[in-house]
Image (spheres, grey):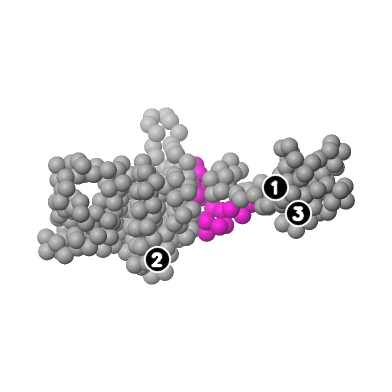
Amino acid sequence: MNDSNAAVRVIGLSKQYAAGFRRTPVLALSDVTLDVGNNEIFGLLGPNGAGKTTLIKILLGSLLPTSGTAAVNGFGGGDWRSRLSAGYLPENHRFPPYLTGRQMLFCFGGMAGLSRNDIRGKVDSLFELVGLSQWQNTKIRKYSKGMMQRLGLAQALLNDPQLIFLDEPTDGVDPVGRHEIRTILLNLKKAGKTVFLNSHLLAEVEAVCDRVAILNKGKLIKVGPVSGLLDVKPAYHVETAGLDEAVALEVMNSFPTAKFEGTVITVTLEAPRQINDVIDMLRRRNVELVSVAPVKISLEESFLELIQGGGHHE
Protein backbone atom coordinates (compact mmCIF):
# COMPACT_ATOMS: atom_id res chain seq x y z
CA MET A 1 0.00 0.00 0.00
CA ASN A 2 1.37 3.41 -0.93
CA ASP A 3 -1.06 6.30 -0.82
CA SER A 4 0.62 9.70 -0.73
CA ASN A 5 -2.64 11.34 0.34
CA ALA A 6 -2.84 9.58 3.70
CA ALA A 7 -0.37 9.69 6.56
CA VAL A 8 -2.41 6.96 8.28
CA ARG A 9 -4.82 4.57 6.58
CA VAL A 10 -6.83 2.01 8.52
CA ILE A 11 -9.26 -0.35 6.75
CA GLY A 12 -11.57 -2.79 8.51
CA LEU A 13 -9.23 -3.12 11.48
CA SER A 14 -10.19 -5.52 14.27
CA LYS A 15 -8.25 -6.84 17.26
CA GLN A 16 -9.36 -9.61 19.55
CA TYR A 17 -7.48 -10.58 22.71
CA ALA A 18 -7.65 -14.07 24.15
CA ALA A 19 -9.04 -13.96 27.69
CA GLY A 20 -7.83 -17.27 29.06
CA PHE A 21 -9.30 -20.75 29.36
CA ARG A 22 -13.06 -20.88 28.76
CA ARG A 23 -13.38 -17.12 28.88
CA THR A 24 -14.95 -14.97 26.19
CA PRO A 25 -12.29 -13.24 24.03
CA VAL A 26 -12.07 -9.46 24.39
CA LEU A 27 -12.80 -7.48 21.23
CA ALA A 28 -10.62 -4.37 21.56
CA LEU A 29 -11.24 -3.03 18.03
CA SER A 30 -14.12 -3.82 15.70
CA ASP A 31 -13.99 -3.02 11.97
CA VAL A 32 -12.34 0.40 12.33
CA THR A 33 -11.77 2.37 9.13
CA LEU A 34 -10.26 5.86 9.03
CA ASP A 35 -7.73 8.05 7.21
CA VAL A 36 -5.45 10.76 8.56
CA GLY A 37 -4.33 13.25 5.92
CA ASN A 38 -0.88 14.72 5.60
CA ASN A 39 -0.18 17.97 7.47
CA GLU A 40 -3.10 17.84 9.91
CA ILE A 41 -3.43 17.48 13.66
CA PHE A 42 -5.70 14.51 14.24
CA GLY A 43 -7.20 13.74 17.64
CA LEU A 44 -8.20 10.31 18.95
CA LEU A 45 -10.77 10.43 21.76
CA GLY A 46 -12.52 7.81 23.82
CA PRO A 47 -13.12 6.62 27.39
CA ASN A 48 -10.81 4.16 29.13
CA GLY A 49 -10.97 0.77 27.43
CA ALA A 50 -12.19 2.24 24.13
CA GLY A 51 -9.31 0.72 22.14
CA LYS A 52 -7.18 3.85 21.61
CA THR A 53 -3.91 2.33 22.85
CA THR A 54 -4.51 -0.87 20.88
CA LEU A 55 -4.97 1.17 17.69
CA ILE A 56 -1.75 3.12 18.23
CA LYS A 57 0.21 -0.08 18.99
CA ILE A 58 -1.00 -1.62 15.73
CA LEU A 59 -0.06 1.52 13.78
CA LEU A 60 3.41 1.45 15.36
CA GLY A 61 3.87 -2.21 14.47
CA SER A 62 4.18 -3.46 18.05
CA LEU A 63 0.89 -5.35 17.86
CA LEU A 64 -0.63 -7.40 15.05
CA PRO A 65 -4.30 -6.99 14.11
CA THR A 66 -6.70 -9.91 14.05
CA SER A 67 -8.07 -8.70 10.73
CA GLY A 68 -7.94 -5.64 8.49
CA THR A 69 -5.01 -3.48 7.42
CA ALA A 70 -3.15 -0.45 8.75
CA ALA A 71 -0.53 1.68 7.03
CA VAL A 72 1.69 4.57 8.12
CA ASN A 73 3.08 6.89 5.44
CA GLY A 74 2.21 4.29 2.82
CA PHE A 75 3.90 1.35 4.60
CA GLY A 76 2.11 -1.47 6.41
CA GLY A 77 2.21 -1.43 10.21
CA GLY A 78 4.55 -4.43 10.26
CA ASP A 79 6.97 -2.84 7.78
CA TRP A 80 10.12 -1.49 9.47
CA ARG A 81 10.09 1.48 7.07
CA SER A 82 6.86 2.72 8.67
CA ARG A 83 8.68 3.16 11.98
CA LEU A 84 11.54 5.04 10.35
CA SER A 85 9.09 7.64 9.07
CA ALA A 86 7.29 8.15 12.40
CA GLY A 87 8.07 9.54 15.84
CA TYR A 88 6.43 8.48 19.09
CA LEU A 89 5.97 9.99 22.55
CA PRO A 90 4.42 7.36 24.85
CA GLU A 91 2.32 8.11 27.88
CA ASN A 92 4.14 8.10 31.25
CA HIS A 93 7.56 7.88 29.61
CA ARG A 94 10.67 7.71 31.80
CA PHE A 95 14.13 9.08 31.05
CA PRO A 96 17.31 8.33 33.07
CA PRO A 97 17.38 11.12 35.71
CA TYR A 98 21.18 11.07 35.93
CA LEU A 99 21.56 12.16 32.27
CA THR A 100 21.30 15.70 31.01
CA GLY A 101 18.68 16.46 28.37
CA ARG A 102 21.43 16.62 25.73
CA GLN A 103 22.91 13.28 26.79
CA MET A 104 19.47 11.70 26.67
CA LEU A 105 18.93 12.75 23.06
CA PHE A 106 22.34 11.33 22.08
CA CYS A 107 21.44 8.08 23.87
CA PHE A 108 18.03 7.69 22.23
CA GLY A 109 19.32 8.86 18.86
CA GLY A 110 22.04 6.20 18.99
CA MET A 111 19.45 3.50 19.77
CA ALA A 112 17.47 4.72 16.76
CA GLY A 113 20.49 4.15 14.53
CA LEU A 114 21.49 7.79 14.02
CA SER A 115 25.18 8.68 13.88
CA ARG A 116 26.65 11.06 16.45
CA ASN A 117 27.24 13.61 13.69
CA ASP A 118 23.57 13.41 12.66
CA ILE A 119 22.44 13.85 16.26
CA ARG A 120 24.88 16.70 16.86
CA GLY A 121 23.45 18.51 13.85
CA LYS A 122 19.89 18.30 15.20
CA VAL A 123 20.14 18.65 18.98
CA ASP A 124 20.44 22.43 19.24
CA SER A 125 17.55 23.12 16.86
CA LEU A 126 15.34 20.56 18.63
CA PHE A 127 15.99 22.10 22.04
CA GLU A 128 15.17 25.48 20.58
CA LEU A 129 11.96 24.15 19.03
CA VAL A 130 10.70 22.77 22.36
CA GLY A 131 11.92 25.74 24.38
CA LEU A 132 14.63 23.96 26.38
CA SER A 133 17.81 25.53 24.96
CA GLN A 134 18.97 26.81 28.34
CA TRP A 135 18.22 23.46 30.02
CA GLN A 136 19.92 21.01 27.67
CA ASN A 137 22.95 20.56 29.96
CA THR A 138 20.84 20.22 33.13
CA LYS A 139 20.23 16.84 34.75
CA ILE A 140 16.80 15.44 33.92
CA ARG A 141 16.04 14.95 37.63
CA LYS A 142 15.65 18.74 37.84
CA TYR A 143 13.09 18.91 35.01
CA SER A 144 9.44 19.71 35.73
CA LYS A 145 6.65 17.56 34.24
CA GLY A 146 6.14 20.08 31.46
CA MET A 147 9.86 20.10 30.66
CA MET A 148 9.86 16.28 30.61
CA GLN A 149 7.03 16.32 28.08
CA ARG A 150 8.86 18.83 25.90
CA LEU A 151 12.03 16.74 26.11
CA GLY A 152 9.92 13.74 25.04
CA LEU A 153 8.72 15.73 22.06
CA ALA A 154 12.33 16.48 21.10
CA GLN A 155 13.09 12.74 21.34
CA ALA A 156 10.12 11.94 19.09
CA LEU A 157 11.41 14.39 16.47
CA LEU A 158 15.03 13.17 16.39
CA ASN A 159 14.62 11.21 13.15
CA ASP A 160 12.81 14.14 11.48
CA PRO A 161 9.58 12.14 11.08
CA GLN A 162 6.74 13.20 8.84
CA LEU A 163 4.23 11.74 11.31
CA ILE A 164 4.36 12.07 15.11
CA PHE A 165 2.26 9.93 17.47
CA LEU A 166 1.67 11.60 20.85
CA ASP A 167 0.00 9.72 23.70
CA GLU A 168 -1.42 12.12 26.32
CA PRO A 169 1.29 14.78 25.74
CA THR A 170 -0.25 17.29 28.18
CA ASP A 171 -1.35 14.87 30.91
CA GLY A 172 -0.29 16.18 34.34
CA VAL A 173 1.14 19.38 32.88
CA ASP A 174 0.22 22.75 34.38
CA PRO A 175 -1.71 25.35 32.30
CA VAL A 176 1.47 27.19 31.25
CA GLY A 177 3.08 23.92 30.15
CA ARG A 178 -0.05 22.90 28.23
CA HIS A 179 -0.06 26.21 26.39
CA GLU A 180 3.62 25.76 25.47
CA ILE A 181 2.99 22.24 24.16
CA ARG A 182 -0.03 23.40 22.14
CA THR A 183 2.17 26.06 20.55
CA ILE A 184 4.78 23.44 19.65
CA LEU A 185 2.13 21.21 18.03
CA LEU A 186 0.80 24.09 15.94
CA ASN A 187 4.37 24.95 14.89
CA LEU A 188 4.92 21.33 13.83
CA LYS A 189 1.88 21.58 11.60
CA LYS A 190 3.22 24.82 10.11
CA ALA A 191 6.44 22.93 9.37
CA GLY A 192 4.45 20.40 7.34
CA LYS A 193 4.28 17.61 9.94
CA THR A 194 1.31 15.40 10.73
CA VAL A 195 0.39 14.92 14.40
CA PHE A 196 -1.70 11.98 15.67
CA LEU A 197 -2.80 12.97 19.16
CA ASN A 198 -4.32 10.62 21.72
CA SER A 199 -5.74 12.58 24.64
CA HIS A 200 -8.55 12.56 27.20
CA LEU A 201 -8.24 16.35 27.72
CA LEU A 202 -11.06 17.47 25.47
CA ALA A 203 -10.25 21.17 25.73
CA GLU A 204 -6.74 20.47 24.42
CA VAL A 205 -8.13 18.52 21.47
CA GLU A 206 -10.62 21.30 20.72
CA ALA A 207 -7.81 23.87 20.77
CA VAL A 208 -5.39 22.22 18.31
CA CYS A 209 -7.01 19.43 16.28
CA ASP A 210 -8.29 19.76 12.74
CA ARG A 211 -10.27 16.53 12.92
CA VAL A 212 -11.23 14.07 15.63
CA ALA A 213 -12.13 10.38 15.79
CA ILE A 214 -14.16 9.00 18.70
CA LEU A 215 -13.76 5.37 19.75
CA ASN A 216 -16.05 3.63 22.21
CA LYS A 217 -15.94 -0.07 23.11
CA GLY A 218 -13.70 -0.74 20.12
CA LYS A 219 -16.03 0.84 17.58
CA LEU A 220 -15.52 4.05 15.65
CA ILE A 221 -18.46 6.30 16.51
CA LYS A 222 -17.65 9.42 14.54
CA VAL A 223 -14.85 11.05 12.51
CA GLY A 224 -14.79 14.64 11.36
CA PRO A 225 -13.90 18.25 12.10
CA VAL A 226 -14.16 19.37 15.71
CA SER A 227 -16.96 21.75 14.70
CA GLY A 228 -18.90 18.74 13.38
CA LEU A 229 -18.86 17.10 16.79
CA LEU A 230 -20.74 20.10 18.14
CA ASP A 231 -23.54 19.59 15.61
CA VAL A 232 -26.35 19.25 18.12
CA LYS A 233 -29.83 20.70 18.23
CA PRO A 234 -29.83 24.47 18.79
CA ALA A 235 -30.63 25.68 22.31
CA TYR A 236 -31.27 29.17 23.67
CA HIS A 237 -31.47 30.98 26.98
CA VAL A 238 -34.39 33.42 26.98
CA GLU A 239 -34.24 35.81 29.93
CA THR A 240 -37.48 37.61 30.81
CA ALA A 241 -38.41 40.36 33.25
CA GLY A 242 -40.98 38.00 34.79
CA LEU A 243 -43.16 35.00 33.99
CA ASP A 244 -46.54 34.01 35.36
CA GLU A 245 -47.64 30.41 35.69
CA ALA A 246 -50.12 30.54 32.79
CA VAL A 247 -47.47 31.75 30.30
CA ALA A 248 -44.96 29.15 31.52
CA LEU A 249 -47.55 26.41 31.01
CA GLU A 250 -48.28 27.63 27.47
CA VAL A 251 -44.57 27.64 26.62
CA MET A 252 -44.20 24.10 27.98
CA ASN A 253 -47.18 22.86 25.96
CA SER A 254 -45.77 24.30 22.73
CA PHE A 255 -42.10 23.50 23.43
CA PRO A 256 -41.87 20.36 25.65
CA THR A 257 -38.07 20.70 25.98
CA ALA A 258 -38.38 24.07 27.74
CA LYS A 259 -36.81 24.31 31.19
CA PHE A 260 -37.40 27.13 33.67
CA GLU A 261 -35.05 28.63 36.22
CA GLY A 262 -36.49 31.74 37.77
CA THR A 263 -37.17 34.16 34.93
CA VAL A 264 -34.93 32.31 32.43
CA ILE A 265 -36.28 29.82 29.89
CA THR A 266 -33.86 27.33 28.30
CA VAL A 267 -35.35 25.74 25.21
CA THR A 268 -33.94 23.16 22.75
CA LEU A 269 -35.28 23.41 19.22
CA GLU A 270 -35.26 21.44 15.98
CA ALA A 271 -34.03 24.42 13.95
CA PRO A 272 -32.61 27.86 14.87
CA ARG A 273 -35.50 29.71 13.20
CA GLN A 274 -37.90 28.28 15.79
CA ILE A 275 -36.56 30.71 18.39
CA ASN A 276 -38.68 33.32 16.57
CA ASP A 277 -41.79 31.29 17.45
CA VAL A 278 -40.80 31.31 21.13
CA ILE A 279 -40.22 35.07 21.08
CA ASP A 280 -43.50 35.73 19.24
CA MET A 281 -45.44 33.68 21.80
CA LEU A 282 -43.93 35.60 24.71
CA ARG A 283 -44.58 38.95 23.09
CA ARG A 284 -48.23 38.06 22.44
CA ARG A 285 -48.51 37.50 26.20
CA ASN A 286 -46.85 40.87 26.89
CA VAL A 287 -43.78 39.24 28.44
CA GLU A 288 -40.85 41.66 28.59
CA LEU A 289 -37.67 40.10 27.12
CA VAL A 290 -34.31 40.98 28.67
CA SER A 291 -32.05 38.89 26.42
CA VAL A 292 -31.95 35.95 24.01
CA ALA A 293 -28.66 34.05 23.69
CA PRO A 294 -27.64 30.74 22.06
CA VAL A 295 -26.31 28.06 24.38
CA LYS A 296 -22.72 27.08 23.54
CA ILE A 297 -22.25 23.32 23.66
CA SER A 298 -18.74 22.35 24.74
CA LEU A 299 -16.78 19.52 23.16
CA GLU A 300 -17.02 17.68 26.47
CA GLU A 301 -20.82 17.84 26.50
CA SER A 302 -20.99 16.76 22.87
CA PHE A 303 -18.52 13.94 23.51
CA LEU A 304 -20.53 12.63 26.46
CA GLU A 305 -23.73 12.80 24.45
CA LEU A 306 -22.15 10.83 21.61
CA ILE A 307 -20.79 8.16 23.97
CA GLN A 308 -24.04 7.79 25.90
CA GLY A 309 -26.14 7.89 22.77
CA GLY A 310 -24.08 5.30 20.90
CA GLY A 311 -22.91 7.76 18.29
CA HIS A 312 -26.07 9.78 17.71
CA HIS A 313 -27.09 13.13 19.17
CA GLU A 314 -30.52 13.19 20.68
Q: Position of residue 138 (x, y in %)?
A: 16, 48
Q: Position of residue 156 (x, y in %)?
A: 27, 55
Q: Position of residue 237 (x, y in %)?
A: 70, 47
Task: Give the spatial CA distance, label 1 vs label 2.
Answer: 39 Å
| Residue 54 seen | no
Q: Name the amino acid, label 3.
A: Ile
Badge 2 is on which residue? 39
The image quadrant of residue 264 is top right
Task: Please tell me which residue lies in front, 208 or 48.
Answer: 208
Badge 1 is on which residue? 237
Question: Looking at the rendered structure, which numbered label has been put on residue 275?
Answer: 3
Query: Quick one: quadrant of the N terminus?
Result: bottom left
Task: Please tell me which residue lies in front, 302 or 110.
Answer: 302
Q: How many neighbours does mark 2 have within 10 angstroms: few (below 14), some (14-19), or many (20 or more)?
A: some
Q: Secondary structure at mark 2?
A: loop
| CB atoms of marks 1 and 2 within 8 Å | no
| Residue drawn where x is 57% and y is 57% of the image | 228
From the viewer's perspective, is the residue at label 1 or at label 2 nearer? Answer: 1
Sooner in the amino-acid sequence: mark 2 or mark 3? 2
49 is higher (above) or lower (below) than 281 = above
Q: Secondary structure at mark 3?
A: helix
Residue range (magenta): 214-233
Q: Residue furthest top?
A: 22
Tell whether 189 sits left or right of 150.
right
Sooner in the amino-acid sequence: mark 3 or mark 1? 1
Q: How many neighbours does mark 3 have within 10 angstroms: few (below 14), some (14-19), or many (20 or more)?
A: many
| Residue drawn where x is 46% and y is 55% of the image | 207
Q: How many neighbours does mark 1 have within 10 angstroms: few (below 14), some (14-19), or many (20 or more)?
A: some
From the viewer's perspective, is the residue at label 3 or at label 1 nearer? Answer: 1
Tell whether 191 sits left or right of 127.
right
